[in-house]
Image (tube, helix red, strand yellow):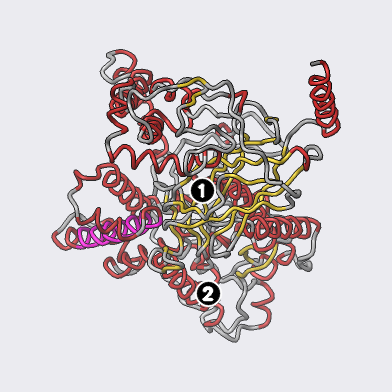
Amino acid sequence: MAAPLPNRDFVTTIRDDGSRPFLFPADTRGRFTLARQVSALLLIGFYLSLPWIKIGGYPAVFLDVAERRFHLFGIILAAQDMWLLFFLITGLGFSLFFVTALLGRIWCGWACPHTVFLDHVFRRIERLIDGDAVSRRTLAAAPLSGEKMARRVLKHGLYLLVSATIAHLFLAYFVSLPAVWSMVSAAPVEHWSAFGFMTVFTGLLYFNFAWFREQLCIVICPYGRIQSALIDDNSLVIGYDTQRGEPRGKVHAAGAGLPAESSAKTGDCVACNRCVHVCPTGIDIRQGLQLECVGCTACIDACDEVMTRLHRPTGLIRYDSQAGFSGRITRWLRPRTVLYGILLLVGASVATWALSTVRPANFGVTRITGAPYIVSADFVRNQFFVRIVNKRNEPARFVLHLRRAPAGLQQNGLTAPIEVGPLGEIVQPLVLQQARRDYAGPFIFGVEVGSASGSFHLQRDVEFLGPDARLLREEENEQREHDHREPARH
Amino acid sequence: MNPAPNTPPPDDQLRPHEFDGIQEYDRRLPNWWLATFYGAIIFWAGYWFYYERAHLGPTNQARVEQQIAVIEAARLAAAPSVDDASLWKMSRNPVFVEAGRATFTTTCVSCHTEKLTGAIGPNLVDHLWIHGGRPTEIYNTVTNGVLAKGMPSWGPVLGPKKITEAVAYVLSYHQEGEPIEVQAAWVPPPPPK
């Protein structure tokens, strides 16, 4: 049973009985096809090479979940830096708003890993083994034979191989390549959870790319749905120029050089249906903007090829806005693009600033439980715990300095540089005391912890607590008078 | 072949509700979607039978308790026995004393000084003790602290093992049976003039 005819009332890839017609999109040639192939090659190279490239001794992207250390292009983030995720997520949100309002579903067609791997890896394998769209459809309908069996085994074997490769490199993002390699070399019994993850993930990828395909974009992907709410009449979409194309008409036998009255009667669309045959989501772009369209540009190249052959201008199907298709001028500068742009800029600036505050270590100063301060015969004393966290995978030496400390403040503890092991943390007492005669009341001072080499430092403001200085003086004076009077009585 | 732009299904397939002029057709859900739906129901039945009905799997509470028991057992195995005799014995053992010295150097020296002769905190090498000089008394003082005078309670910070080692290190400066005198309060050396 063939797929239903494309229409705007229901999804073409789901039949009345709920079954799914498998699509056999035809090949395209042209500038967009070529450009997408080149960009996909670069993107696949980028995705797959990240775990191999080392920056500062770590893979370029290494989300070390086990150690809770996240390496991003030389920046090391620890669990304590999780708050930066706020900027990552809002940043993604604002970029999404901005790009979609301006350029429509440019992400889906050009950069989404689903599209990139499907169109440029899995569909390529399918094309290589099963041939073009017509051969694929014939083969699918043919009864099982030795040849069909061989082709199916070869194709699905390659699918599984590629899925497993992607799954392994994906795991390498989280555990690094050497760990993946050592797990691959060892028996599955030694790491069931990783083996299970790998099997399930490979299976999911295989299912998705071998069969599920456009259903992911149409039914599951939330981004595809949100975009419907972000696009307006001035957003860039792929569409069909109804004014130029309609009414559709067959080309006369003469082909090019149509009589004037004939071209006046019919539009430029020759109803060849090439745009429908190449569509990977089974829609007819001439029916207008539809949620199934992932902006893959296949119909642009298909139509341009036909138009070129007929010596008619290309661009009957093209990138344009809804406004452009209805003969108006596309307004790029609109309240929503300006607003989204400003939000994106503000978000990006704050995120850059936030990221610049991240250091390879963290520290905190907390008051030791018990009395907030202690007044002894000669001193006012405050006691703190200093916790230093080393986020690096190698030992580091830290030094502690007091800043803006008043004269006479004595530091006990952490006076010498201290070494913290790889990914380790230490807690040490810092006891500060000030001689009574120098004491002038509570004050705020800075505690600075930096690397011994001086490559970075962090500072925290801490309050030195104590009694009011005048009360302390009065108490001292009373004590002195008392001391003076005592011997006099004898 | 030129499909009509719209091929509306029969009217009876249109659902009655309408929002902002948008109506929906009553279409069958995709079979693969129904498969996930019925699959989830079948999974639920099995899960419910396994955990709630037949009690074949452990409950979450039992699992938590089991994990806590493992942690507790490890802690008990690591916690040293604390009595005067064993603390004295540890103070003669170089392994314990060395481990205790490491803890003392990072944690205690800021008040008791590297030579244990005292500064902010009292002298630990003389025969004068404020809160008791028997090994278990020293151990308790370290664990619970003397908050009014600024000695923190180190129990939650260091744990029994490190405290035992640190006490063994202090005891290594003393001899079993030596005199213990009670001191009322520690008088720190005056500030440098």
Residue density around tag 1, few if under 14, some if 14–19, many if 20 or more, within 10 Å: many
Q: In the image, what residue type sits under mark 2?
A: Phe
Q: Measured from the top left, where is residue B67 in percent x and y? A: 33, 25
Q: Nearer the viewer, residue A194 or A472?
A: A472
Q: CA distance from mark 2 to mark 1?
A: 51 Å
Q: Chain of mark 2?
A: A
Indicate whether A106 appears above or below A370: below
Reading the chain from its start, which is encountered first: label 2 or label 1? 2
Q: Main secondary structure of the magenta part?
A: helix
The C terminus of chain A: image quadrant? top right
Which of label 2 and label 1 is nearer to you? 1
Residue density around tag 2, few if under 14, some if 14–19, many if 20 or more, within 10 Å: some
Q: Chain of mark 1?
A: A
Res. A10 visible in picture: yes
What residue does disc 1 label?
A: A389
> Magenta segment: does it hold B24?
no
Q: Measured from the top left, where is residue A193 in percent x and y? A: 29, 42
Res. A286 visible in picture: no
Q: Nearer the viewer, residue A335 or A82?
A: A82
Q: Which mark is residue A32?
A: 2
Q: In the image, what residue type sits under mark 1?
A: Val
The residue depicted at 68 percent of the width and 71 percent of the height is A244
Q: Which residues are magenta?
A: A151-173
The residue depicted at 55 percent of the width and 76 percent of the height is A304
Indicate whether B171 appears above or below B48: below
Q: Secondary structure at mark 1?
A: strand
Outermost residue on the front side: it is: A490
Indicate whether A39 appears above or below A1: below
Q: Measured from the top left, where is residue A75 in percent x and y? A: 53, 61
Q: Secondary structure at mark 2?
A: helix
